[in-house]
């Protein structure tokens, strides 16, 4: 499973100003901030943005200046795929190394939504053993026990990261992953579709 929260889109106004730099066409800009502080693209600016978006990556450099920050909670097996998108993305994660023993292991910390009952039973056994190891480690501070936890920890363990990326990153992610086998990618692509002007500037179908 994957969830997103605390999403924020930043710098669209400055990115659009920069998009007009090559032709010194700032006087044609018609965008504005509404009463809620949202930046609204006017007809002229939206038309320019769409033309640049469709012209290819060399012409849509302004999209690299539209930033998105979001908290993503997802299983480790999904993060391993997300980590292929290194250029232009930054993430600060909760620490498995430092905090893995700070709270009891529970089923709710793992993505198990596609497990059948027999697999869930195995999962419960693994979690029970992880919790036993955690308590032993807290009592003894034995590094070997800590290593047992780290090496046994399943890849469906969920981790939260605060991620920053830009619209150009999201173009690549969306079109590469929208038909992926993992449901987590579908959830993330659904999130991308909710961003301001995503249809015109990211999806562009």
Image (cartoon, rainbow, N blue to C red):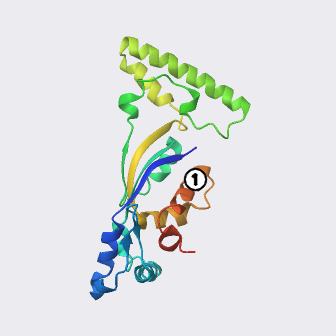
Q: Is residue 122 left or right of residue 106?
A: right
User: Residue furthest toward the right?
Assistant: 117
Q: Secondary structure at mark 1?
A: helix
Q: Is residue 79 left or right of residue 11?
A: right
60 vs 132: above or below:
below
User: Residue furthest toward the top?
Assistant: 139
Q: Residue at x 55, y 19 (%)?
A: 129
Occupied quadrant, residue 41:
bottom left
The picture places residue 115, in percent across and down from the top left corner, at 68, 37
Q: Is residue 151 left or right of residue 99?
A: right
User: Residue furthest toward the front?
Assistant: 35
Q: Is residue 170 left or right of residue 123?
A: left
Task: Assess disc 1: are there few (<14), some (14-19) or many (≥20) residues with their C-alpha within 10 Å of its C-alpha.
Answer: some
Observer-nearest of 119 and 112 = 112
Counting every numbered tag in the picture gives 1
Observer-nearest of 93 and 42 = 42
Q: Residue at x 38, y 76 (%)?
A: 31
Q: Residue at x 62, y 28 (%)?
A: 123
* Quarter of the N terminus within the rendering: top right
Observer-nearest of 33 and 86 = 33
The picture places residue 154, in percent across and down from the top left corner, at 54, 34
41 vs 177: above or below:
below
The picture places residue 153, in percent across and down from the top left corner, at 50, 31
Occupied quadrant, residue 53:
bottom left
């Amino acid at each position: 499973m994957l969830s997103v929260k605390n999403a924020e889109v930043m710098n669209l106004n400055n990115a659009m100003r920069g998009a007009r730099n090559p032709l010194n066409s700032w006087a044609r800009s018609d965008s504005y901030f509404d009463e809620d502080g949202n930046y609204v693209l006017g007809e002229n600016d939206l038309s320019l943005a769409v033309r640049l978006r469709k012209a290819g990556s060399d012409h849509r450099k302004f999209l690299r200046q539209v930033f998105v920050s979001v908290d993503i909670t997802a299983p480790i097996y999904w993060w391993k795929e997300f980590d292929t998108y290194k250029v232009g993305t930054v993430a600060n994660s909760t620490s498995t190394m430092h905090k893995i023993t700070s709270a009891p292991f529970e089923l709710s910390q793992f993505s198990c939504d596609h497990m059948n009952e027999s697999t869930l039973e195995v999962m419960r056994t693994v979690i029970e053993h992880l919790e036993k190891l955690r308590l032993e480690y807290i009592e003894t501070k034995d590094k070997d026990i800590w290593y047992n936890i780290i090496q046994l920890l399943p890849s469906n363990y969920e981790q939260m990261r605060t991620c920053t990326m830009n619209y150009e990153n999201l173009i690549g992610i969306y079109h590469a992953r929208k038909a992926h086998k993992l449901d987590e990618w579908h959830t993330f692509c659904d999130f991308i579709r909710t961003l301001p002007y995503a249809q015109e500037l990211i999806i562009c179908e």
